[in-house]
Image: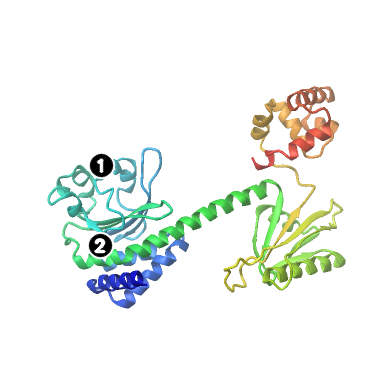
Amino acid sequence: MLMEVSHNQAAAHLFAQTTVSLSDFSALLGNIYQGPMEQVPWGKALEQIRRQLDANYVTLILRSPATDRRGLMINASEHGGSTLPGETSYNNYYYALDPFIGLPSDRVVTIDEHLGPGVWCQSEIYLQFLKDVGIRYILGADLRTDDGVECRFRVCRKHEGRDFSAADKALCTALLPHLKRAVDLHSRLDVVESERTVYASAIDRMLVGMVILDETGAIIKTNAAADEILGAKDGIRIAKGGLDVEYGQENRKFQRLLRQAMMGHLGTAPAVMEAMSVTRPSGSARLGVLIRTIPLSEWSEDNRKRPACVVFIRDPDRRSQASHDVVRQLFDFTPAETQLALQLANGLTLDEAADELGISKNTARAHLRAIFSKTGVTRQATLVRMLLSSVISLG
């Protein structure tokens, strides 16, 4: 309790040293916390800081450049846009000459304080690079989160401007803990998005359509496989923003399972995981459908547009998109053996695969014997099962 009071008093003392109004400071904090969800993160916040501090540039370096990786900067510029003059040159070369690095964690300092009076204007990076792009004064801080994220915050002014005052430093110091939390949020969201992309790509490669619905049954998201299946309108289709099955009896069952899944999401019934097949008017093999509840987490907000259930759809007639390279690398097949193995994995008989590939049946049998020898199996059915249960569909 005493620590909280002390922290609040310190924050109030810092704010009292600034020249910003309470309403502007509140708007600035709002933009900082909204930043992780913007298309260009913190674009609005950095521009507001630039205007407030009468700066020509404000930069957040999320990823410092190095010999083995590209840097990533987010900028607010007096010229508009998000690219600094000479940014490419800095990322490719001048970053190695930058002396304004390794600052004390979460502490605001100026370049002259960091290097000593007069040293900055004699430095190589200033004379060769920054002087020509109109940067003389720099205020900065290095942020390091508990999760190990490191980034740099920099504010720049022109030669004809003035050095940063105690009030300027107080404002940036007051913003630092909020910017640090927002960077931490952005990092965690980025990790979640990276994982989601990997999982979604795997589902696509496995030829499984995925449709996510909210608690009203409206479609929130579909993957590429689902778009193809639904676009065919052969057994299941999009209707009024939701899903409908072609034939009445099957549709009644499908809608009942959807309602049960929604109730499971809301906690008014057990979670659902139910499967059914869907007849296709075209006469093609039935679609396989799996409906699964997405339960609310313990701390979920009241949001009708959050995912409530997922519908997985599998078309047995769709052919594998397995990579030739993955199959060849996994089993050490020749290119010809790889082509034959993939045709068999797609459900063709040996004779059908030979016709599809334009080779003789004797050649196909020779390839199959070589495949058996390399995989250690002796039956075609066992080979197909091995291929389908391997990682080839993820490549």
In percent of width and height, residue 293 lies at 70, 63
What secondary structure is found at the residue carrying circle 1? helix
Image quarter (top left, top right, bottom left or bottom right) of the N terminus: bottom left
Disc number for residue 131: none
Amino acid at circle 2: Ala
- The quarter holding residue 349 reads top right
Local crowd size for mark 2, using a 10 Å CA cut-off: few (<14), some (14–19), many (≥20)? many
Q: How many marks?
A: 2
Image quarter (top left, top right, bottom left or bottom right) of the C terminus: top right
In percent of width and height, residue 133 lies at 24, 51
Residue at (71% x, 73% y) in the render: 268
Up/down of 22 relative to 172, above or below: below
Q: Write down the residue under mark 2.
A: 55
- The quarter holding residue 218 reads bottom right
Mark nearer the N terminus (1 vs 2): 2
Up/down of 213 relative to 197, above or below: below
Marks 1 and 2, how far apart in space?
23 Å
Amino acid at circle 1: Leu
Q: Is residue 58 left or right of residue 393?
A: left
Q: Write down the residue under mark 1.
A: 97
Q: Nearer the viewer, residue 37 or 246?
A: 37
What secondary structure is found at the residue carrying circle 2? loop
**Mark 1 or 2, which is nearer the eye?**
1
